Amino acid sequence: MKVAIACEASSFQLKEQVKKYIMNLGYEVEDVGQLSEDENVLYFEAAANLARKIQSGACERGIVFCGTGAGASLIANKFKGVYCVACESIFTAEKISLINNANVLAMGARVVSFDMGCEMAERFLAGQWCEGFAEQRRKNNERGFEVLKQIEEEQRYD
């Protein structure tokens, strides 16, 4: 699986730790945010770069970092087909791909430790939508995701 990853200045160290960790797990990573500590990429730039990679299909999943995860998730979610959730726990990071079919995880360097961030990324990337669900629960989740996509279409501001 190809994973886009991006950060801004305050989250550079966390991004580097998570990037190294998931590459060691065998994921192909494309870094589209701040590439060195000398740069000063802003959260909205990093999130938009990452969202474009997901939207275009160049990457299947993404992980975006900022101070809290909130700002990056707000920006990423403005891109059609990008479903980003800011997480502060391993449990939630695992469930967003399994239950919600999220394709982007956002996390905050001021909230998440290096070890926790690595574990969150691993669980998020390993999750497959509706895996292990009973047929009715899977159908309900699929119907819910269709409603989400319908709302997304109705709310386009093009």
Image (cartoon, rainbow, N blue to C red):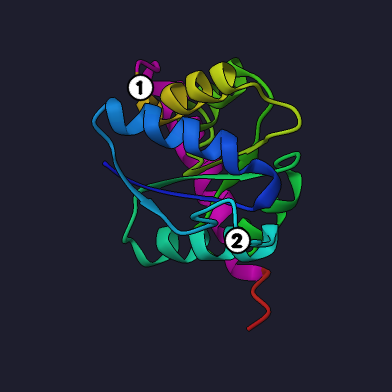
| SS for dot 1 | loop
Q: Residue at x 49, y 55 (%)?
A: 35
Quarter of the view holding residue 142? top left
Pick the residue in front: 145 or 125.
Answer: 125
Element under disc 2: loop
**Could you say which disc has been placed on residue 58 in the image?**
none
Sequence-wise, the earlier of marks 1 and 2 is: 2
Q: Which residue is mark 2?
A: 39
Which label number is shown at residue 131?
1
Q: Nearer the viewer, mark 1 or mark 2?
A: 2
Residue 104: x and y in percent read 51, 44
Please tell me whether residue 140 belongs to the stretch shown in magenta: yes
> Magenta span has 37?
no
Which residue occupies 65% across, 42% down? 11
**Residue 33 visible to the viewer:** yes
Closer to the camera in the image, 9 or 26: 9
* Extent of the magenta region: 132-154
Q: Are marks 1 and 2 in contact (CB under 8 Å)?
A: no
Q: Position of residue 135 (x, y in %)?
A: 37, 21
Amino acid at dot 2: Glu
57 or 36, nearer to the observer: 36
Q: Is residue 151 visible?
A: no
